[in-house]
Amino acid sequence: MPAGLCTRSSLCRSKKKRFCTQDKEYVGFATLPNQVHRKSVKKGFDFTLMVAGESGLGKSTLVNSLFLTDLYKDRKLLNAEERITQTVEITKHTVDIEEKGVKLKLTIVDTPGFGDAVNNTECWKSVADYIDQQFEQYFRDESGLNRKNIQDNRVHCCLYFISPFGHGLRPLDVEFMKALHEKVNIVPVLAKADTLTPSEVKKKKIKIREEIEQYGIKIYQFPDCDSDEDEEFKQQDLELKESIPFAVIGSNTVVEAKGKRVRGRLYPWGIVEVENPAHCDFVKLRNMLVRTHMQDLKDVTRETHYENYRAQCIQSMTKLTRESGTDFPIPVVPGVAETETEKLIREKDEEVRHADYELESHRDHDHESAHNFDHHEHSDPHPSPERHLDQKGDEAL
């Protein structure tokens, strides 16, 4: 065999061997994150944010500042007399936002009228009921026939606005957070921080954190950093934890400061810049909500708050089934409309259950009649003349 041919065949064999080795080493499942990313981007994301707190603390302005939208175009401002008689309402604003090809369906749940009445006893109840209703609706959809297109309206985060005019938490603040901390991720926010000096902000933050711990309020806990995270991320996470409650300023007005146009508030003594970390925690709150912890807020809602509700639901339904003997898994909830399919299934289930009951009753009746007849045959001391003649005829045969 010529030397050149031998060399070429050896080279081909070595290439084939190297290709096979590479093919064995690389299966391809390393592309799974890319597949999930493409699918998620195509489907889009949803996030539901609740804002709660008394009127005049800048909730609407902050929400518009956070997401650069105007969600409150048609809002009607009430006067003092109207606010006194107003009850707590729940209003929803939904907006579709797109950024670099990523779609986000943002739902803002507002609570106008909260804390505005003279008597605010249990004014948090309608808020708690709303959160439970969203859990209930999701549970019904999840247990229904069409599970592909479930709409998630569960509240993923609640920004609770604390007034800067006070010495810490008010009784209403404590009552609200204690009533809802098992149902939703609560993130406390110190509103209108531009009314306080930096030293006052620092003291008030320490005071509020102490009172939160004292009253046993479970606010949203930032997850601990993994050991392989870089130092910059760990530092950011530490700063976020120390920033609770976030001292924020909201503004949709663009002003000029040092030759630059920025969003802020113009005062006689200077300009407060909303996005300046030295002036307030607005940037930290936005980064936490959108850039770093949005998915974790959704995960905690799904894995902790919703699972707790689901477990309680299943326990109560099991107890109800044992007591009433019904087999239908989902109870009728007042205020939640049934679909035609669910209504039909429920009616058919009741018909079958009624038929089973009737059949069981007939069986019991027939069994009891047969038992009484047999007992009469064996224990009758005075047989009838007909039976006596029949017995004689049998004997003669």
Image: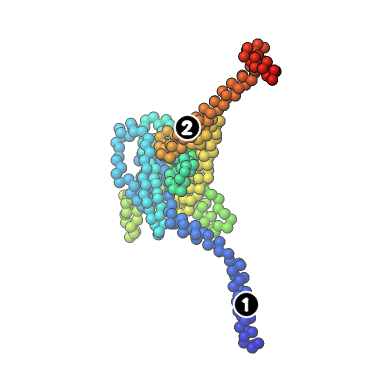
Q: Quadrant of residue 339?
A: top left
**SS at mark 1 in the image:** helix
Compared to residue 395, the image places residue 107 above or below, namely below
Residue identified by numbered label 1: 14
- Where does residue 78 sit, x and y in percent of width and height? 30, 37
Tell whether 370 sits left or right of 163.
right
Residue at (43% x, 40% y) in the render: 341
- Where does residue 54 sit, x and y in percent of width and height? 38, 38
- Where does residue 252 sit, x and y in percent of width and height? 33, 50
Q: Residue furthest bottom?
A: 2
Q: Quadrant of the C terminus?
A: top right
Let me know if residue 192 appears in the view.
no
- Where does residue 298 sit, x and y in percent of width and height? 48, 48
Compared to residue 348, the image places residue 8 above or below, namely below
Tell whether 322 sits left or right of 342.
right
Tell whether 76 sits left or right of 325.
left
Give the mark nearest the N terminus, 1 or 2. 1
**SS at mark 2 in the image:** helix
Q: Is 124 or 5 nearer to us in this picture?
A: 5
Residue at (30% x, 33% y) in the render: 82
Q: Quadrant of residue 160?
A: top left
Residue type at mark 2: give it.
Glu
Compared to residue 115, the image places residue 381 above or below, namely above
Residue identified by numbered label 2: 351
Residue type at mark 1: give it.
Ser
Residue at (64% x, 20% y) in the render: 374
